[in-house]
Amino acid sequence: MIRIRERIRDAAERGNVTMLMVVLMIGIIPLLGLGIDGAANANAHTQAYAVAQAAARAGANVLEAGGAIDSGTVRLGDAAAAQARSYMDAAGYGGSAVREGDSLHVSVEKCQPTQFLSAIGIGCLPVSASASADLVSR
């Protein structure tokens, strides 16, 4: 008789843990997805900054040869910005490069695709970074 009562009581509670897990997973899975897409976006930002720095350095390597030979004065060449843009294009980034005197300012931008946020209509997260290179002559 006691066994029948225990079985009836146990049968009434069967499945409660499953429902609890379903409810918890509905909240946990989006948080995991947000964490994964957020980490990918942070990594993409680091890569964009590295590309901006490298593009600025590549552009800063373009010097005016004529001025250096004639007067010994070293200046950034007119093609410095074009060289930086060429580097950004080769790396798969858009953006701008502007030469101002002996400085080269580079800004890069890219759209980082999402994996989980695309389920709610956010297909990509914008990533941008900027860097500068200053010509120092001694």
Image (cartoon, helix red, strand yellow):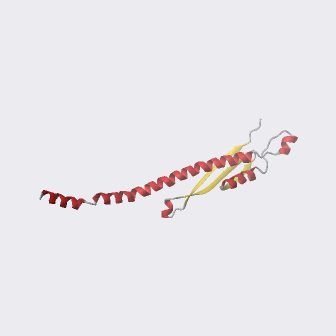
Q: Residue at x 79, y 48 (%)?
A: 77
Residue 99 locus on image (x, y percent): 74, 49
The C terminus lies in quadrant? top right
Q: How many marks?
A: 0
44 or 106: nearer the eye?
Answer: 44
Q: Please state if 111 lies on the left or on the right of 81 as rendered.
A: left
Q: Point out the residue furthest to the bottom here.
A: 121
Q: Point out the residue furthest to the top here.
A: 138
Q: Residue at x 36, y 57 (%)?
A: 24
Q: Please state if 75 lies on the left or on the right of 22 as rendered.
A: right
Residue 86 locus on image (x, y percent): 72, 54
Residue 132 locus on image (x, y percent): 68, 46
67 or 122: nearer the eye?
Answer: 122
Q: Please state if 70 lies on the left or on the right of 47 as rendered.
A: right
The N terminus lies in quadrant? bottom left
Q: Residue at x 66, y 49 (%)?
A: 52
Q: Point out the residue furthest to the right here.
A: 70
Q: Please state if 78 lies on the left or on the right of 35 as rendered.
A: right
Residue 111 locus on image (x, y percent): 59, 58
Q: Residue at x 15, y 60 (%)?
A: 4
